[in-house]
Amino acid sequence: MHSNLDCVTKKLPEVQRLLANQYIDIFCATEFCPKNFLIILEDSHIAVDGYEVFSNFCSKGCRRGTVISLKNNLNTKILSLFSYVDVYPWVECVAVDCQLPEETSIAGNIYRSPSAPNANDLHQIVADLVSKIASSSSNSKFITRDFNMPDVIWVDGYGFTTLNNPDQATLNYVASPALTQLIDQPAHYRDGQNPTTLELVFTNNPDTVMSIRYLPAIGSSVHNCAMFSVLAATRPSNMIKSSYKDLIKSENTCQIGNL
């Protein structure tokens, strides 16, 4: 699930209720921190029972905050964790590489500030982050992004905008044939503005995504939530081994009344 919270300070109880009632395994959120830089969040401030929290709060480049919360009962082993640090505070990222019972999976959460300048190095940083996640050795890759590109229209997983729009540079940098964008309707609704598709979900395994649901915004946020169900590889359990002779014997002794 992905959501732009526009500051979690007064919304944490609602986030806790949402996670408890919707059976969400992975929760990705952007704009966790308040705009007031005098208030600094730590992972312990946003702890939710039953979840392990990963954020970029401790990095010098953290302005609004990106967070991934993983449910404890996933039986995951954290293989690696990285967040974008220092140089360019307009782009924030946190990504977690996990070992599931039958496969490895990486979840990345990237945020680009709406105040970000149209600079080539900024576009390149966004592209480098996407490339780093997309090129990992994990079987399944999921990237939630809030790039703040309101003029981009998404059709069948591809982004389109006018030729001279600054967002075209980012689209050119992040275009990847290995990733498919899943969100197909706006999730950002603000009075006096046209609805826009800002929250995005990319994956290398679109066939494993069973459904996508759009939920109301959390608190006073103007961003609706996007929740998607993924079919993950699991180890078969309670399997009974039997030989062909045993199977034939069992079939011959079956009674019609027991079928």
Image (cartoon, rainbow, N blue to C red):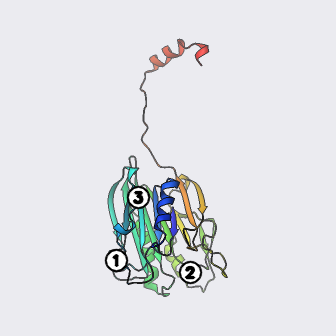
Q: How far apart are marks 3 and 2 (CA)?
A: 33 Å
Rendered location of residue 189, percent (x, y): 63, 74
Rendered location of residue 224, percent (x, y): 58, 68
Which marked residue is nearer to the observer: mark 3 or mark 2?
Answer: 3
Disc 3: which residue: 70
**Which quadrant of the figure has residue 186?**
bottom right
User: What's the residue at 36%, 74% (across, down)?
Assistant: 57
Disc 2: which residue: 168
Kindly identify the amino acid type of the residue bearing the numbered disc 1: Val
Q: What element carries label 1?
A: loop
N-terminal label among 3 and 1: 3
**Between 113 and 182, the one nearer to me in the picture:** 113
Mark seen at residue 85: 1
**Between 222 and 205, the one nearer to me in the picture:** 222
Q: How crowded is mark 2: few (under 14 residues within 10 Å), some or many (20 or more)?
A: some
N-terminal label among 2 and 1: 1
Left or right of residue 121, residue 151 in this image: right
Does residue 179 appear in the picture of this structure? no
Q: Distance between the residues labelled 3 and 1?
A: 22 Å
Q: Are the residues at dot 3 and dot 1 in contact (C-beta closer than 8 Å)?
A: no
Does residue 17 appear in the picture of this structure? yes
Q: Is residue 133 above or below residue 208?
A: below
In the rendered image, the quadrant that contains the C terminus is top right
User: What's the residue at 43%, 65% (across, down)?
Assistant: 108
Q: How crowded is mark 3: few (under 14 residues within 10 Å), some or many (20 or more)?
A: many
